[in-house]
Amino acid sequence: MALCSDMTTSAANAIARHYLPWLAAIAGALLIIALSSITTIADASPPAEATDIELTLGGIKTVAQTFVINQPDLAGLAIRLRPAAAGGPDTKISVHLRYADGPPFDLVIGDAIPSAARDGVLTLRFPAITVIRDPRVPTTTLRLTLGIPKLRPNTGPFITVRPNPQSQGGLVIDRSPTPRQGLVIVPIYQRRWADQLWPISALARGKPGLLGWPPLYPLLAYAYLIMIAAGSAALRRTLRPQDN
């Protein structure tokens, strides 16, 4: 009985020694996937300036503004907008976001509620979108269009415009360009924690299928290290009898 028990224990230990490295490797792969999937949303709030001018939306049909982004994974916009005065009308504003010069389809479409603004800033959040056409050129220009429902002139919410120091234009109110002023917009970006160590988002951007999944690249590096470690262990086992 003692011999049988020893054999059972030895077999269990052998099985454990065989499978334990594989279980540890799988656990490591799952940990890499989890760490590579952590994302955060960068806070952004356009501060007020002395040159800011407030315009009431009453009597306006559309407000369009072009702006440039310089990072991928756009996840929102912060706009200086103040709700209507107490007792004044408050309504939904339609939001359309698309390329300034590109295919005529919306990247983002929805409604904004001015009363949701906090401290004079209305924050629009949406699922992160990659709007970079070419991964080698991390910049592009978008156009935000706000559709205003019918309101009496000088009533309704207030938008904030300020002088455009570069005189690049981009602000259009009811199809009338206003080159010397611009709507106050700050892009909000989603950031991947693992990009601080290795730009896996940039490696995956624009690639089809599995190649567009950022955790794939640290997993490949991890698998490569596992293969090196396994090969080194096998080589040591092979050479060990020759050392005796």
Image: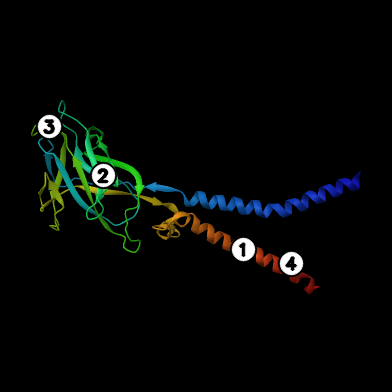
- The answer to whether residue 109 is left or right of residue 178 is right
For label 4, the residue is: 237
- Of the numbered discs 2 and 1, the one sitting upstream in the chain is 2
Q: Residue furthest left?
A: 153
Give the percent coordinates (x, y) of residue 164: 14, 54
**Amino acid under label 3?**
Leu
> Mark 3 Cα within 10 Å, few/some/many (few <14, many 20+)?
some
> What is the spatial separation of the Cα atoms under label 4 and label 1, in whole angstroms?
15 Å
User: Which quadrant holds the N terminus?
Assistant: top right
> What is the spatial separation of the Cα atoms under label 2 and label 1, in whole angstroms?
47 Å
**Amino acid under label 1?**
Met
**Amino acid under label 4?**
Arg
> What is the spatial separation of the Cα atoms under label 2 and label 4, in whole angstroms?
61 Å
For label 1, the residue is: 227
Evaluate whether residue 149 shows in this view. Answer: yes
- Of the numbered discs 3 and 2, the one sitting upstream in the chain is 2
